[in-house]
Amino acid sequence: MTELTVDLQDAFEGPGTPTEIQIQSWAGAAWLGDHDSEVTVRIVDSDESRELNHQYRGKDKPTNVLSFPFEAPEGITVALAGDLVICAPVVEQEARDQHKDPEAHWAHMVVHGMLHLQGYDHIEDKDAEVMEALEIRLLAQLGFDNPYEAEETEPDS
C-alpha cells in the first residue's frame, strides 16, 4: 500500500476549515499512485485564490480548488504529486448555495483536486464521466454521499 504525505499550509484566518487529519485522510484515499508521494495542500482566502486563478488560468475571480501537478525535469525522480490550493470562502459559499454539508464539500474538493494532480480532467464529457464516477466511489468509501446528486428539496406548502 502506498502512502501520501500531506504538507498542510493553512493561510486562511477563519473558522470552518478541516483539520489536518481530515485533509490527510481525504487526500490519501484519493492517491491512486503505485508509489509513495507527497502533496502540499494550501488553504487560502479569496484574494490569494483570485490572484493565482488569474495568473495561471486567466480568470480574475477566486475558485474552489486549483491543482498544480509537479513536473520533474527530465532525469529527476522526486516523489511529489504537486500542490492543491483550496479557497476556504469559496468552498464554504458553494456548500451553502448547494445545500451541502460543508465537511462533505471540503472532502469532495480535496478528492477532486487530488485526481487532477494524477491526470484526470473533466474537459471532455467522456473524461468527466470517468472522473465523476471515481470521485463518487472514493467519497462513498470515505462515508460521503454522491456530490453530483441534486439535493432533495421539500415541496412548497
Image: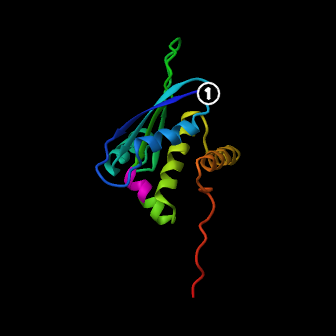
Quick one: which residue is furthest to the left in this view? 13
* Residue 61 is at least partly visible in this image: no
| Residue for point 45% across, 64% down | 96
Q: Does the magenta run of residues contain 90?
A: yes
Q: Where does residue 4 sit, x and y in percent of width and height?
A: 51, 30
Q: Disc 1 designates what residue?
A: 1
Q: At 37% from the left edge and 55% from the top edge, which residue is drawn?
A: 16
SS for tag 1? loop
Q: Is residue 49 magenta?
A: no
Q: Which residues are magenta?
A: 88-92
Q: Is residue 39 above or below residue 57?
A: above
Q: Majority secondary structure of the magenta segment?
A: helix
Numbered circles on residues, count = 1
Q: Nearer the viewer, residue 143 or 48?
A: 143
* In-image side of 93 versus 152 (left or right): left
Residue 24: x and y in percent read: 47, 38
Residue 146 seen anywhere in this rendered image of the structure: yes
Dot 1: within a 10 Å radius of its alpha carbon, few (fewer than 14), some, or many (20 or more) residues?
few
Say what amino acid the circle numbered 1 marks. Met
In the rendered view, does 65 fall on the left or right side of 146? left
